[in-house]
Image (spheres, grey):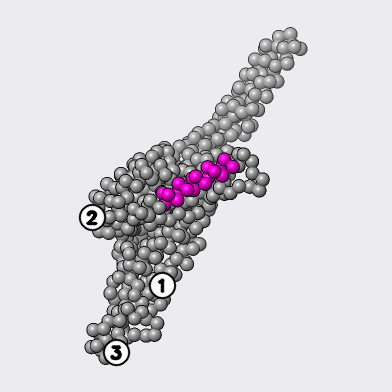
């Protein structure tokens, strides 16, 4: 291909017709010389056929972090290649730098590093590598683009894991879980539902835990100890329909639901409960079930990474069929959705009595702080401010009615702002665990 330098050579012949008697001869001579120089320069450019590419580096990264991917270019040919390289990724991968200049002698390899700072979770693939070998005069170059579906270089995909801001409160929740399990305080103050052992009464024990028959046989006061239920089933249901695309702050509502589901999954796995995941809108997008509990959180995190909001109505009848096809063992069903009137009335509410009859149901929704903010009038309100505040009050009142209807149907409702949402869902789980209501 021809560069801008070749265009300048052609431009030298343009003013010649004004001064020369036979300018076309000179123009033809200059043009021919420029073409010959460009062809010679292209022929002297290092060949691209001897270049081999390979990649190495990070395969996964948490959203908000950075990853490094190394592209190595090996020159297996017999000539030096002056190379301009462009490493292109999808825009949301946040890749940089994109352009690199290399001088590869024969038999030498050189590596360039691309730093990726993704802006969304999910799969972020590399698109193509463009190689341009320039001639020594800089008049022409050879170029080739390598897509990842060719044999020149292996495919590379960066899996961006969803943001997990509630990790900061995970130690606190695990400490409470250990208290529930009885690892810190003495077991046997009436919490839990599975009988563990008998022991002598100590000051502070609940008198309701005294075993009178054992006390009569032992001639001493004996109490029963209990341990929390284990091996219970927890289903996390993520609504990925259109309501999950509403921005809460600067992120979709789905991101807050994923964060809360991750915290709950880690807690339940540490408590030796079985955690399954269902993500659905108009179809079931992700289903994670079975497998060992030790590796289950990693599988759940990997599955949630690919979830994106879908502009479609959520079909909760799919959830009903999914739960009915399973065994009849009681489980904790945590549904992460929006507490909006229309989706609840048309979708979840008709199904809820059948779910609560068989399972313990939690309906968890993230509150939009912008609606609460707009419900308050400014110091000097105008007519528009009054109308906006009235609309916000109406939205909040409808949300309260939805919450009351869900509670009346037997569901436990979590309605909280994004910064406390995950912690409140975890607290409800720990409370149910401690009271033996799973």
Check the image and report above or below for 263 versus 321: below
Label of residue 179 in the image: 1
- Magenta residues span 386-403
Disc 2: which residue: 327
**Residue ID at (48%, 39%):** 127
User: The N terminus appears in which quarter of the rendering?
Assistant: top right
Q: Is residue 5 visible?
A: yes
Number of other residues with Cα within 10 Å of mark 2, as a class: few under 14, some 14 to 19, many 20 or more: few
Residue 313 in magenta?
A: no
Number of other residues with Cα within 10 Å of mark 1, as a class: few under 14, some 14 to 19, many 20 or more: some
Q: Position of residue 364 (x, y in %)?
A: 41, 53
Residue 388 in magenta?
A: yes
Secondary structure, mark 1, is: helix
Alpha carbon distance from label 2 to label 1: 31 Å
Q: Position of residue 56 (x, y in %)?
A: 47, 50
Helix, strand or loop for the magenta stretch, by majority: helix
Cβ atoms under marks 3 and 1 closer than 8 Å: no
**Residue ID at (38%, 57%):** 412
Secondary structure, mark 2, is: loop
Q: Position of residue 434 (x, y in %)?
A: 37, 68
Q: Is residue 116 visible?
A: no
Question: Mark 2 vs mark 1: which is more N-terminal?
Answer: 1
Disc 3: which residue: 220
The quadrant in which residue 30 appears is: top right
Q: Position of residue 314 (x, y in %)?
A: 37, 42
């Amino acid at each position: 291909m021809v560069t801008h330098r070749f265009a300048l050579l052609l431009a030298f012949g343009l003013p010649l017709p004004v001064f020369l008697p036979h300018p076309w001869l000179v123009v033809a001579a200059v043009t021919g010389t420029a073409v010959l120089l460009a062809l010679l320069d292209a022929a002297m450019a290092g060949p691209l056929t001897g270049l081999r590419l390979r990649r190495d580096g990070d395969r996964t990264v948490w959203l908000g972090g950075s990853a490094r991917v190394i592209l190595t270019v090996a020159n297996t040919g017999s000539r030096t290649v002056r190379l301009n390289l462009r490493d292109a990724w999808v825009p949301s991968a946040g890749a940089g730098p994109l352009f690199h200049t290399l001088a590869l002698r024969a038999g030498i390899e050189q590596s360039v590093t691309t730093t990726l700072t993704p802006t969304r979770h999910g799969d972020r693939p590399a698109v193509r590598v463009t190689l341009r070998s320039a001639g020594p005069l800089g008049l022409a170059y050879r170029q080739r683009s390598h897509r990842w579906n060719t044999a020149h270089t292996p495919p590379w995909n960066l899996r961006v894991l969803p943001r997990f801001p509630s990790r900061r409160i995970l130690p606190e929740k695990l400490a409470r879980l250990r208290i529930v399990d009885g690892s810190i305080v003495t077991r046997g103050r009436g919490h839990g539902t599975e009988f563990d052992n008998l022991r002598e009464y100590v000051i502070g024990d609940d008198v309701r835990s005294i075993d009178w028959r054992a006390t009569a046989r032992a001639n001493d006061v004996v109490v029963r100890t209990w341990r929390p239920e284990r091996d219970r089933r927890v289903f996390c249901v993520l609504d990925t329909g259109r309501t999950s695309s509403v921005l809460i702050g600067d992120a979709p509502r789905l991101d807050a639901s994923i964060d809360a589901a991750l915290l709950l999954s880690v807690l339940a796995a540490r408590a030796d409960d079985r955690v399954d995941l269902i993500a659905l809108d108009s179809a079931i997008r992700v289903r994670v079930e079975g497998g060992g509990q030790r590796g289950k959180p990693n599988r759940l995190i990997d599955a949630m990474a690919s979830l994106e909001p879908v502009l479609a109505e959520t079909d909760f009848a799919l959830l009903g069929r999914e739960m009915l096809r399973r065994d009849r063992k009681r489980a904790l069903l945590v549904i992460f959705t929006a507490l909006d009137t229309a989706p609840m009335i048309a979708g979840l509410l008709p199904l809820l009595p059948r779910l609560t009859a068989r399972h313990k149901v939690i309906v968890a929704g993230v509150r939009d702080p912008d609606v609460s903010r707009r419900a308050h009038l400014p110091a000097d309100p105008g007519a528009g401010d009054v109308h906006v505040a009235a609309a916000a009050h109406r939205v909040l009142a409808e949300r309260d009615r939805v919450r009351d209807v869900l509670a009346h149907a037997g569901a436990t409702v979590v309605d909280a702002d994004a910064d406390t949402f995950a912690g409140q869902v975890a607290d409800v789980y720990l409370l149910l665990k401690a009271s033996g209501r799973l």
